[in-house]
Amino acid sequence: MNYSFRKKNKTVKFIIIHYTGMKNLRSAYAKLSKINSDVSCHYLISRSGIIFNLLCPNLKAWHAGKSQWKNITNLNDYSIGIELENRGHQFGYDDFTSTQYASLKKLTYFLKKNFQIDEQNVIYHSDISPNRKKDPGEKFDINKIGINRFKNFISYKKKISIEELLKIYGFSKFYIRRYQSDCIISVKRSLKYKKINNKINKKFIKDFYNLLFDK
């Protein structure tokens, strides 16, 4: 099992949700457990809702990779990683099961309470690495685990630029500047769009605004 020790000044602030992106649970479990895989996570939830606690959340797992969120880099230092069994976009992207959502809801509630994690810090792999990752993807519905990431966001009456919306969402300045198209695609996955592209139109702007500010 791959892991590192968290430094004393690196406390858990985030829960990051992933999908496994592998053909079956056995393959995913094996990869996440092998020391030569260069990846690991804290929890794995099967399609039948079984929660595998692979690593103590006080330790640092290798799940986020090269990542940024707001003004923070290297999210492994500050996060707990949860993998949901799903074949992903490469092998036949599935709907997540009701038992997965039920187990994830219980787990996130437990982690939020024990690590004092704010709801807005329950985020996606595609949020912190939009240029590299798609997961958990457009079929994931965070409402089914009772999380409202943006419930405390203050709405704006004036017109806001797309760059400002992306910043409010949480993308780092570097990602907005270098990978704006990827950030837009990531937001469309959060909005559960069926057609995913980097086009900006009035409907997208309205949907994006409502995602952030419509309570």
Image (cartoon, grey):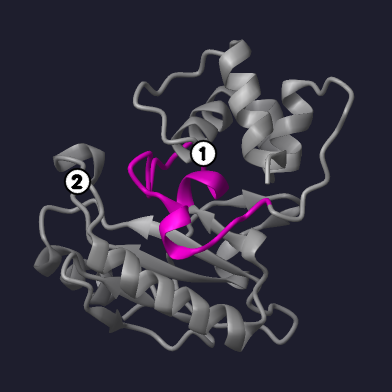
Position of 95 compared to 130: left or right? left
Report x, y in % for residue 212.
68, 40
As displayed, is residue 36 above or below residue 131?
Answer: below
Towards the viewer: 181 or 74: 181
Residue 155 on image: x %, y %: 82, 39
Q: Alpha-carbon neighbours of circle 2 within 10 Å: few (<14), some, or many (≥20)?
A: few
The amino acid at mark 1 is Pro
Where does the N terminus fall, quadrant-wise? bottom left
Question: 68 above or below 44?
Answer: above
Q: Main secondary structure of the magenta part?
A: loop
As measured in the structure, the alpha-carbon distance from the residue carrying label 2 to the one carrying label 1 is 20 Å
User: Which amino acid, mark 2?
Assistant: Asp
User: Is 43 within the magenta?
Assistant: no
Report x, y in % for residue 55: 38, 84
Label 1 neighbour load within 10 Å: few <14, some 14-19, many 20+: many
Tell me the mark number nearer the camera, choosing from 2 and 1: 2
What residue is at 18 percent from the left and 53 percent from the top? 22
Question: Which portion, as a residue range, is magenta?
Answer: 125-150
The residue under the point 35% across, 76% down is 43
Instruction: Please name the residue shown 50% across and 63% down the image.
Output: 146
Kindly tell me whether residue 22 is visible in this rendering.
yes
**Residue identifier under label 1:** 130
Q: Are marks 2 and 1 in contact (CB under 8 Å)?
A: no
Q: Residue at x 72, y 22 (%)?
A: 162
Q: Which mark is residue 94?
A: 2
Q: Residue furthest front?
A: 215
Tell me which corner region of the image, top left, top right, bottom left or bottom right, holds residue 116: bottom right
Task: Give the quadrant of residue 54.
Answer: bottom left
